[in-house]
Image (spheres, rainbow, N blue to C red):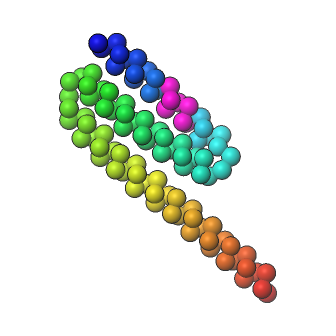
Amino acid sequence: MEWVYFGTSIAILVTMVLAVVRGLIGPTIFDRVLAVNMFGTKTVLFLAVISFLSGRPDFLDLALAYALINFIGVFAVLLFFQSRGVRREAEAEREADK
């Protein structure tokens, strides 16, 4: 049964690498943020699989804490870029009015 966990952990690691590649070549900032979010989610899944492999359920607590940090971090970054876009539009309108 352990080979299933090993196979799952390899698959998760491959998708984590794909998320990093997408984050590096993403044409927009939202592609990059989505890749970071995907990487964080896969990290939580990887921690859960490792906890089952090693028989240490305390890793699940770490995975839950990381999931909350990942959610709050991605949400904060998206709000920052949204407000930055609004500020740029307002500055462009002010420049056009002059």
Compared with 2, 89 (above or below) is below
Q: Is residue 40 left or right of residue 54?
A: right
Query: Residue 95 falls in which quadrant of the image?
Result: bottom right
Compared with 79, 45 (above or below) is above
Query: Residue 48 falls in which quadrant of the image?
Result: top left
Quadrant of the image containing the C terminus: bottom right
Specify whether residue 15 is painted magenta.
yes
Residue 61 in percent (x, y) is at 24, 41
Region of the chain picked out in magenta, as a range: 14-20
Which residue extends farthest bottom?
98
Q: Residue at x 58, y 46 (%)?
A: 32
Residue 55 in percent (x, y) is at 20, 24
Q: Provide the major secondary structure of the magenta segment.
A: helix
Q: Is residue 87 left or right of residue 45?
A: right
Quadrant of the image containing the N terminus: top left
Specify whether residue 97 is painted magenta.
no
Q: Residue at x 26, y 25 (%)?
A: 52
Q: Is residue 64 left or right of residue 72?
A: left
> How many labels, in total?
0
